[in-house]
Image (cartoon, grey):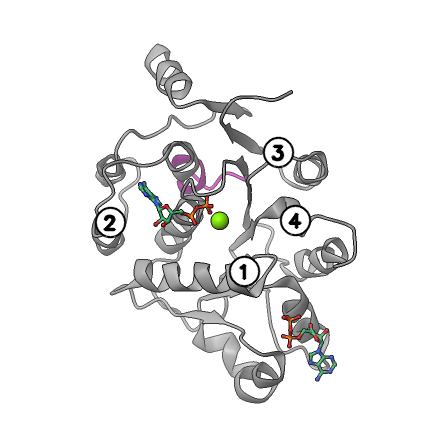
Amino acid sequence: VEEINALRKQNLITVLGKDVPAPIKLFDDLRTSEYKLLPRLLENLTSYGFAQPTPIQMQALPVLLKDRALMACAPTGSGKTLAFLTPIINGLRCHKTTGLRALVLAPTRELAQQIYRECGELTKGTGLRTHFISKVSEAKQQYGPECKQKYDILISTPNRVRFLLQQQPPLLDFKSIEWLVLDEADRLMEEGQNNFKEQLDDIYAACTNPQKRVAFFSATYTVPVAKWALRHLKNLVRVTIGVQNS
Ligand code: ADP
Ligand code: ADP
Ligand code: MG
């Protein structure tokens, strides 16, 4: 316990929640019996050549690999993308025809596209298929119901997703969603002009699998995100990296 606390302190990791899994020190720790990361995923991760996980990766990876709900706050540029893509890919393991099993939402197309690219790297050799909705009109014509079987992971902005969900018949099916990640969650939870908040409520309602894992990632800790997470998610873990400013 002392060692765990020291590692957290040293990396400015603050945790809130019951029985929070210990942080990892090295990516190689994910090879150990407890996590048994997919060999191919570990290989892809290693091929980046990163010397060690960033603080958010040290703590968020074990939390998500243990299927816990997570609210994570860590500075921009601290490697949050890998911290959520790795557990998703490990959890899904291989391509299935079930339909979409993971949904990652980001506030802008550019951010969604960056995540999509990173996901391409990380899923190499796993057979998992990732989809990025580049245009709603195309999605309507080309993917439609097919999209439900062809892809495992969907990365998008909320507006498009909600639009496709609202079509009759709906052009997306989230019944099988096992992983829901909101990146830049503080922005996604804003009530202002974008109406992200309302879009998210609709999308969340469409993910009907009670076993789904939910994770929020953002640069800053905000009260609306914490409130929403605490109200909706059981057994939540909150992780904050950096000096506490409150
Ligand atoms: P964030 O979402 O927190 O702003 P990103 O996930 O976009 O950060 O990552 C920022 C950069 O850091 C990317 O270029 C990524 O490849 C790199 N990176 C990710 N993990 C590590 C690591 N463990 N060590 C060094 N660089 C990393
Ligand atoms: P973005 O997601 O960047 O805002 P899109 O072109 O993907 O841009 O479409 C965004 C939104 O525009 C959709 O979520 C929907 O609300 C609206 N929209 C797109 N196509 C149609 C359409 N054919 N009919 C009605 N609304 C549409
Ligand atoms: Mg990011």
Q: Quadrant of the C terminus?
A: top right
Q: Which residue is mark 3?
A: 221
Pair 4/1: label in front:
4
In the picture provided, is 209 more to the left or to the right than 86?
right
- Nearest to N terminus: mark 4 or mark 1: 1
- Nearest to N terminus: mark 3 or mark 1: 1
- Nearest to N terminus: mark 2 or mark 4: 2
* Label 3 beta carbon less than 8 Å to ligand 1: no
Q: Position of residue 9 (x, y in %)?
A: 41, 17
**Nearest the camera: 3 or 145?**
3
Q: CA distance from mark 1 to mark 2?
A: 24 Å
Q: CA distance from mark 4 to mark 1?
A: 22 Å
Q: Which residue is mark 1?
A: 177
Q: Which residue is mark 2?
A: 42
Looking at the rendered structure, the secondary structure element under dot 4 is helix
**Which amino acid type is shown beneath numbered disc 2?**
Leu
**Which amino acid type is shown beneath numbered disc 4?**
Arg
82 up-or-down from 62: above or below: below
90 up-or-down from 142: above or below: above
- Nearest to N terminus: mark 3 or mark 2: 2
**Which mark is drawn over residue 187?**
4
What range is drawn magenta here?
62-69
**Which mark is drawn over residue 118?**
none
Q: CA distance from mark 4 to mark 3?
A: 11 Å
What residue do we see at 26% from left, 43% from top? 36
Q: CA distance from mark 2 to mark 4?
A: 31 Å
Q: Position of residue 33 (x, y in %)?
A: 24, 36
